[in-house]
Amino acid sequence: MITLSFHGAAGTVTGSKTLITINDKRLLVDCGMFQGPRVLRQRNWRPLPFDSSGVSAVVLTHAHVDHTGFLPRLYKAGFRGRIYATPPTVELAKILLLDTAHIQEEDAEFRNRRRATRHEKALPLFTADDAKATFEHFSTVSFNRWKKLGSEVRFRYHPAGHILGAGSIEVQLDDGQKQISVLFSGDVGRYSTPLVNEPCQPPETDYLVCESTYGGVVHEPQDIFFATAELIDKVVKDKRVLLIPAFSVGRTQQITYILNVLMAQKRIPSIPIHIDSPMAVRVTDIYRRFPSYHAINCDELRRGKNVFYGKNVKLHRKRKSSKRLNRLRGPAVIISASGMMTGGRILHHLINRLPNPKTTLAVAGYMAEGTLGRRLLEGAEQVFIHKIPVDVKAEIVTLMGLSGHADAYELFHWLEPWQNRPLRVFVIHGETSRSEAMAHDLRLQRGWEAHVPALDETVEL
Ligand SMILES: [Zn+2]
């Protein structure tokens, strides 16, 4: 018997965990952390509805924390199997897991100091040591190579764009009675985005487990170079500070690259760019090590030319140096994490700069429900950061050309080559309305049977 159980990213975009059970073998596709509002984050503390020690392997689609951030908890609960991922995903996941552990530890310490928790003592979800314990279990698998896990399972990765190393996973299963194939889309990237490879044509399979972050939504077409140039012109003219919250993986490199290109072409004047992220430097080194996994001009990389850090770019690793940016006057750009404004150094910049009408905040991607990013995008006039009320006088703009996720149109374009109808599509990784919209469009436009699973639902294939 073969079943799929959806223990995360069902009715929401975070916490991706899909359990494949084949006879008495169990493997997990992605092992993500729930993020966003408290009600979702609390799900990270519930006991898993399956025996972790019985899971023989985890296969990761990509490094983002909503796909990897639960690995240390799985390990603590008894998992001792292998964790498979592409080579760049392994390197990025290590950085992101350690960073998440530090945020968890700092947050628990902060809450204990302030006694802001009603529990005896605030605890981190996992520590840096917990994260490191999982590292020995990582194994790399390159794109397009089959990896066999006993006689019942084999899988291979197909490039999905999105971020460095991201893949869709094609799994072939044989329980002795029947042979079936399942494609896990992972997060599907966009077409024609700077630095990121385009998603490859996915193979046809019997079943499809598909993301729906932007189900039913089409991004407005935006020439990202043109839009950024227009934005910078205004920043220079009005001596503004442009604040860009960005994930250290991918988006920080993209923005810096675009700004450098525009300055080199003299389409924008030369202005200071401050990258306030200790992680961004390490992540950029990973880009250098895996030239075949991204769309940067490799000749430039080989010649040692720095495509990310032009002469205007200043990196801020230390906290003290980050705090000094509070006195910075425009025109200037500050890029800082986290992308959805849920933690990290961006928060002190927001406390400092949101009340200032000379600030422009550029939101450059998906903002999950319940995040500060989402509230700002929806036009909140006042927000609370670390329980401090902050008036929002800053101008807020979007740069959706930098979104890492395919919109509804691009997801259909990605699936267009499929000639045969899959037996069933499971639509996950979206807020319920987005997943329902995607399922509806699949039924209407392709005539496919599409189902939006509930959290912890199990289906037999
Ligand atoms: Zn992702």
Image: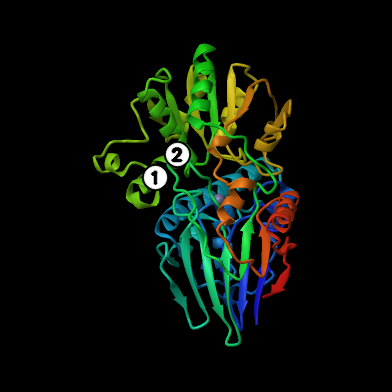
Quadrant into which the C terminus falls? bottom right
Circle 1: element type: loop
Q: Relative to 354, does residue 19 appear above or below in the rendering?
A: below
| Visible residue check, residue 17 | no
Q: Nearer the viewer, residue 304 or 41?
A: 304
Q: In this view, does 460 lie to the left or right of 314?
A: right
Q: Which of 409 and 34 is in front in this view?
A: 409
Q: In this view, does 142 lie to the left or right of 209?
A: left
| Visible residue check, residue 457 | yes
Residue drawn at point x = 31 percent, y = 44 percent = 298
- Image quadrant assignment for residue 264: top left
Mark number displayed over residue 295: 1
Question: Alpha-carbon distance for marks 1 and 2?
Answer: 7 Å
- Image quadrant assignment for residue 256: top left
Residue labelled 2 has its Cβ within 8 Å of some atom of ligand 1: no
- Image quadrant assignment for residue 8: bottom right
**Residue 98: horizontal and vertical position, in percent?**
48, 52
Quadrant into which the N terminus falls? bottom right
Q: Relative to 301, does residue 85 appear above or below in the rendering?
A: below
**Residue 371: horizontal and vertical position, in percent?**
67, 41
Q: Is residue 81 left or right of residue 437?
A: left
Q: Which of 422 and 13 is in front in this view?
A: 422
Mark number displayed over residue 194: 2
**Which residue reaches farthest bottom?**
176
Is the residue marked by circle 1 packed among few (<14), some (14-19), or many (20+) residues within 10 Å?
some
- Disc 1 marks a residue whose amino acid type is Ala
**Residue 412: horizontal and vertical position, in percent?**
61, 52
**Residue 236: horizontal and vertical position, in percent?**
49, 15
- Disc 2 marks a residue whose amino acid type is Pro
Q: How is the image coloured?
A: rainbow
Q: Do the residues labelled 1 and 2 touch (CB within 8 Å)?
A: yes
